[in-house]
Every structure is written in structure tokens, then in C-alpha cells.
Amino acid sequence: MSRRQFWLWRLISVGAALAALLGANALIISLRSTGWLDDYTYRVIMLCGINILLAVSLNLINGITGQFSIGHAGFQGVGAYTSAAFTVFVVSPWMRERGLQGTPTGDSALLIAGIIAGAVCASLAGLFVGIPSLRLRGDYLAIATLGFGEIIRVTILNIEQVGGARGFYGIPLLTTFFWLYLAVIVLLALSRNLLVSTQGLAFLAVRDDEIAAEAVGVYSTRIKVIAFVTGACFAGIAGALYAHFDGYLNPDNFRLDQSIIILTMVVLGGQGSITGSVLSAVLLTAVLEWLRFLPTITVGGRAFSPSELRMVFFSLMLILLMLWRQTGLLGRREFGWHVVRQYWRLLRT
Amino acid sequence: MDPLLSVQNCTMRFGGLTAVKGLNLQLFPQELVGLIGPNGAGKTTVFNLLTGVYRPVEGRIIFQGRDITGWKPHAIARLGIARTFQNIRLFGSMTVLQNVKVGARLHMRTGLWHASWRTYSMLMEEQEVEKEAWHLLREMGLDDVAHHLARDLPYGEQRRLEIARALATHPRLLLLDEPAAGMNPQETADLMELIRRLRDEYDITILLIEHDMKVVMGICERVIVLDYGEEIAQGTPQEIRTNPRVIEAYLGEAPV
Amino acid sequence: MEVYLQQLINGVQYGSIYALIAVGYTMVYGVLRLINFAHGDIYMLGAFVAYYVVTGLALHQHPSVGNFLFVLIVSMAVCALAGVLIERLAYRPIRNAPRLTALITAIGVSLLLENGGIVVFGADPKYIPTVLQSSVAPRGGLYISEGQVIMLAASVLFMLILRFIVMSTRFGRAVRAISYDIDAARLMGIDVDRAITLTFALGSALAGAAGMMVATFTSVKITPLFGLLPGVKAFVAAVLGGIGNIPGAVLGGILMGIIEAFVGGSALTTYRDAIAFMILIIVLLLRPGGILGKAVVEKV
């Protein structure tokens, strides 16, 4: 293939992807305006996108590079809060002075600025967590990342300027379907490219056997740090998009519970499987939302509301998953027809 | 001729235990040298010192004129020292082909950035790597299992794969840790043939640790004997075989 | 000066509670190399059992040592049973699974206990009326309540009994053997399953005792989530002392308690809970083996 052929193909494929995205965006907008798509379903669609970002970015660290990181919500929180602080306190006033507030291009630019701020800060957090963690293995690493996640949360809790325990109100609602799913597509493309490349094999090598990896020239320290920083960066992007979707942030959104939910998505889908993470993120988001509509059960005079049962269901699912299918839905492989055939065969026996 | 590798007075201690004491060793280009000694003599420790897994508490290691004492394993690998392990360490979840490619990755010019964005130069280089990996697999007789998972291979093939992966890094010095362990006579003979061929075709120096004396006597030009971390003899296989100190180390004191 | 002494006393007393919980963590880690995230929730269970027994049998209307001991024993028994159940149902099936699986299972069990607790007990905080006269007596300017003294005495007693069990009984030897090499222990004829079950029972009983005493003697209101933070802090204490090491857990617990008492009384009080995590990170980075532990080297 020649250079020119390559660029032609590249242009076509990127163009096609963008066109598809714009088309989907237009569809969503028209469905919403005619009332076909209600606000709640739209919210679920958007949450799916955010959770895909979170699950895939965590998978990069856990599944692909084999590091136990269970403080991912901390990175999301850093991204969310710093992006919100940036848009609300820095860029918005600047824009208002120049009368750019409220225009479509203005809004997009504002969102991009926020996302960049969130991504940069989250990446720094990833560096901050990743570097000390390099010396730790297994359980110790998991606990350390958990600890970092909590330290981040408590620090945010103590910053009065972003609302502390009361929460951060008044974040401009800038996240659109287009920008969110553009981020999703970029992350998925990046991950997939890495996994099919020879350079990307370095991550898997570090996961499988760090000593052997070093013996063939893989600088495991650098690989682990890259994994942490990239994973944190995209978690931060997810956080930024989330902040500008909800308009409100609270440190409670980024507690250990949230980290566990993201971890469950990764484990359910299969650690090391990108498509697995996508599938399970969508599945779990949908299920968690659907659970809200369960009727309130009354047993022996005591009413059990769906929100309480939600987490019970969730934890039971986690335990059963570990007992019966540790490798998740897709294990380490990506989704392909062979997987469908396998499950089909399983169902028929 | 300048030595390819020069180990100068190296000592390695683990707490109170001295595993290697005052080791002096030189390897010249294209040599095929054996490192033998009873169990616990410190042979694998020497390999670990050479590849940077351990840092000697005393002494220096010079490779191709550079002092690599205290360098980290990945840097030493980049410089041209490759190894296999006593207990096979393959990347079990990856395929045979992928294992070899990781070795080839070492000398790629395009990096992670190019790989993430799938640039033209990356695609071109991937083709090269693919070609080279397949060539190596064919050389080692592993091309028919190229897409099998490394951990599913039978033992003998796993050992060959480890060697293939090491070769993919284009080493100047190859360290083989008990390559014939667990092999039957036929496999051992094939292995000896393979090692000889590798040294001739790839212009590399090979240092191998072995317990199987057939292999050592059969292909090594020079043999170094270790006991309790110290060198007790060095010479041709013939000289070693009749050296009383060596016999004593392996069999205990000779009857009077 | 008196302020410091007071804080020291409080610290030792919190610390003894952390020590009781930490011992359970460290024993389980020693035999299974598993961090039992659910342990803090056993502590919570102990408190709730105490609550239901006291209010159910209206024992607070007849405060006496006998009643106190009764509630204590019931709490410990129920928690021991819970610990054994968890081990058999959730941890035994995955004993040979990779570490991350075990970790996630433990997290799942913890979440189940917490959320199950919310569902069954209700999330509203409950207060246990006292079963024992607990007067706050100033002695030379320091405030020590009878309850604090009893808690400390009970903790010390339990610790001594545990030490006796671990050092001088067959079971204790078995546990120590398993913590070195579980396969070798099995080959030596040790009934590993039974030893592990007993370990869980003991550790959970101690955590239950801790929970019961805290709920009964302090003015803390209990909720299903109230085991979370003490559990984490006790875990940090175990790591601080050297995970897998029982005296280490006791030492770590006391130290944690003292550090917390001093931080709580100082300017950094809002960061009091984060201090535990910071200590954890520092220990893991500088001396992962803990104060009394040793480093492990991987053979290449």
C-alpha cells in the first residue's frame, strides 16, 4: 500500500465514522424534539456512554496491564471537579465578557476547555497514584489505589470553593450526545489500535510476566505508568462530561461504591476485553436504571424500596459472578461470532 | 580480540548467604560456552547478575566495552543480552506469534504513539515485524502452532518458543538456562543441533547452563565450573572431565 | 499536659478496639492471603445483635454484669457463626482462584452485608441503652468511664486468650503452619478446612465483641454502615503492624488509636478519617511488611 492509498483510506474511514456520529446525533435531537424519546431514556443513553468510558479506561489498567486498581472513581472525581471549576470560575466569566456565552460554538468551546482541564488534572492524578504504586503488587496495590481514591475524595470534600459536602451547583449543561460519543469512539479506537499492535503487546506482557517482559526489553515501569495515566485521563474525561451533563456534583458520587460499580462492569465484561467492557457497561447501566422501577415489596409489614434492593442485588450479582464465571462474559477475548456460537452451544446442552 | 563480555570480580550476597564470590569470566564473540556446577552453585544467580535482575555487591560487568553494572534488565536487553529461564516464563495468554513479536518489539522504531493512531509508518513496520516473526517461527519449527496460545504448547515447544522470543530481540549474547531440562534423548539431540546452528547463522555468543553432560561435552567449546559460588575450573570439555576438583565437587571426595 | 494524657488514654482505648478487629484481619490474611473486606461488617453485626438482644429482652432495665456478659456472649456467638457461614459459602469455593477474584468476592460480601443491613435493620441510627452502670469518674483531672476500663480490660483479656490459643494449642500450631505453607500443612495431615473455619470463627467473634462493646459503652449511634470506617482503620492497623502477624495487629491497633486521638484533638481534625489512608500509603511504600513484618523476595 502506498502512502497516498493509506491517507485515502484513513480519510474515508474517519469521515464515515464522523458521518455516522453526526447522523445519530441528528436522529437523537429530532426524536427528542418530537417527543418520541423521553428525557429519561435519553439520560440512560448518556449514562451508558459515560460508563463505557469509565469501564474501558479501567480495563486498560486492570485487564490489559494487569494492575489491580480499585480507586477509579477518584480519577473520575478529579476530572469532574476540575473541569467544572474551570468552566464555572475561569472560562465562563471570560466568555461572558466577550458575549460568547450561550452561542453553540461558544458552548462547544467551553465544554472542550472543561474536558481538557479535567483530562489534564486526572492524568496528573494518575501519575500521582501510578508512580508510588509501581512497587506494589496484587492486594497491596489494590488497597493503595483504594486509599488514594478516598484521599482524593476527602480532599475534594474539604475544598469549600467547590461546595464541599453540600455539592457543586450551577455547572453549565454542555454535554451533548455528539461530544460524549465522540469521546467514546476515540477511546475505543485507541484501545483497539493498541491491542492489535505489536507495541501494545507490551501491556499484555507486563500483565502476564513482568520479569520475562523486562528480559525482552519492555520497560515495565514506563508501561504501567502509561496505563495508569491513560486510564485516569479517560476517567477524567468521563467525569468532565458527567459534570456538565448533570449540572451538579457531590463528593458522594465518587465514593468507593462508584469504584466498585466500575470494577464490576470490567469484571462482568471480562478483564482484557474491550467489547466486553462496552457490553457490560451498557447492560449494567440499563439494569441499574430498570431496577428503579421495581415495585416496592412489602414483607411482614416492612416496605422494601427498589433503591435499597438495588445495591443488594448488585452485591449478590458480584459474588455469584465470582463464584461461577470469574472470567466474565467474554473473558479476555473480544466479541466475535465464535463467542455467539459458544454461548449458543452452551444453551442447547 | 576484545572480550564481548567481561565479568570482573563479581560477588553477590543475599543477607548472610554469599551466592557468588569473586567471579571472573570472559566471553569472546561467537563462542559457545557452558556453565556447569552442582545444584546451588550459583549458576542462575550469575545469569541474573548478567541480565540485571540482581546488582552485584562487588565487582563490575562490562559488555561490549560498556560498564553495565547495576543497569536494569530492560536496558541490558536493549543492549543485546537475551536469556531464557530455568522455569519457562512465557506470556501464557498470548499466542506463539505474539510472544515472538514482543521480542521483535525491542528494535522497532515506531512506538506506542504511532501504534495508538495507526500511522502509515507503524503499518509499514508491522509488516516487517510480521515477516521476521514468521521467519523465526519457521526456523524453530513452530510455524504450524503460530496461533496457539503459548500456555497450550507441549513442553519441548515451549522451550523452543522461549528461544525464538529471545532471538527476536537480535541479541549479541544469548544466555540459555537449562535448555535441555526435561527432554528425552531425541529432543536433546535436536536441541544440540539447533544451538550449534543458531550460533553459526546468527553470529551470536551463547552461554548455557546445563546439567545434561551430553549437551555440555557435545557442543561447548569451553566450560566453566562453579561450586559454592566460586569458579573452580575452566577449560575444554575434555580438560574439565578429568579435573579432580570438578569430580570432587560433583561426586564428593574420590575414594583413596 | 493533662490534655495530652487524656488523649493518650482515649487513644489507647480506641486502639484496643482497632486491635480486636485488626487481629481478625491479620489471622485470615495469614492463612488465606485474603483481605476480608467483610470483617468490618461483622463488627457492625455484633453491634446490631447487641441492640436487638438488649431492646428485645429489655435488659437495659436491669443493668448488671451478668446481663452484660450474656449480651457479649450472644454477640460473639452470632458473629462467629456469620464468619463461618461466609467462609464456607463465599470464600471456600474460590480458595484456589486468582487473588483479584478473591478480593472482589470479599468486596461483594461486604457490600451485601452493608446493604442487606440497610434493608433488614433500616438505615436510621439506633442507640443502645446501657446494660452496665457506666459512670464517668474524674481521677486527678482525667475522665475515664467505667465502660472504657471494661472495654480495655476485656480487649486485653481476649488478646491474652488468643495468644495462648495460637502459641500453645494444636489449633494454634495448625494455623501457624498454614500461614507458612498451606500445601505442606495439608501434607502433614493438618485438617486445613477445619483450621480455617476456626480462624474465621475466632476472628469474627472478636470483631463481634468489639462491636458490641462500642455500641454499648460509647454514645455512638449504630447504622448498617458504621462498620465501614472502623473496618478500614483496623485493616490499616493490621498492615501497619505487619499483616499476618498477630502481635503486630495489636501494636498497630494501639498506634492507630493513639494517632487518631491526637489528630482528632488537633487542627487537622477534618482530615482525621483520611489520616488512616495516608498512613496506609506511607506504610505500603516505605515498609510494606509493617513494623513487625518481614519482606518477601520473589525467586527468579
Image: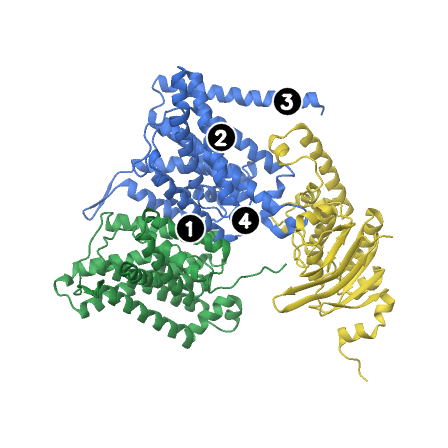
Q: Element type at marker 2?
A: helix
Which chain is green in the rendering?
Answer: C
Mark 4 neighbour class, 10 Å CA radius: few under 14, some 14 to 19, many 20 or more: some
Q: Is residue C118 above or below residue C9?
A: above
Mark 3 or mark 4: whose residue is earlier in sequence = 3
| Circle 4 chain | A
What's under tag 3, amino acid-wise?
A: Trp
Q: Element type at marker 4?
A: loop
Mark 2 sits on what residue?
A184
Distance from Cα at disc 1 to Cα at disc 2: 34 Å
* Front of the two marks 3 and 2: 2
Mark 4 sits on what residue?
A134
| Circle 3 chain | A
Task: Give the colour scheme of this rendering.
Answer: by chain
Mark 1 neighbour class, 10 Å CA radius: few under 14, some 14 to 19, many 20 or more: some
How far across and how far down the image is residue A323, in percent?
Answer: 44, 52
Q: Name the foreground residue: C91 vs C111.
A: C111
Q: State the hue of chain B.
A: yellow
How far across and how far down the image is residue C276, in percent?
Answer: 38, 53
Query: What residue is shown at x 56% (from left), y 20% (from top)?
Result: A15
Position of residue C266 in the picture relative to residue B191 (left or right): left
What's under tag 2, amino acid-wise?
A: Val
Residue B61: give its label.
none
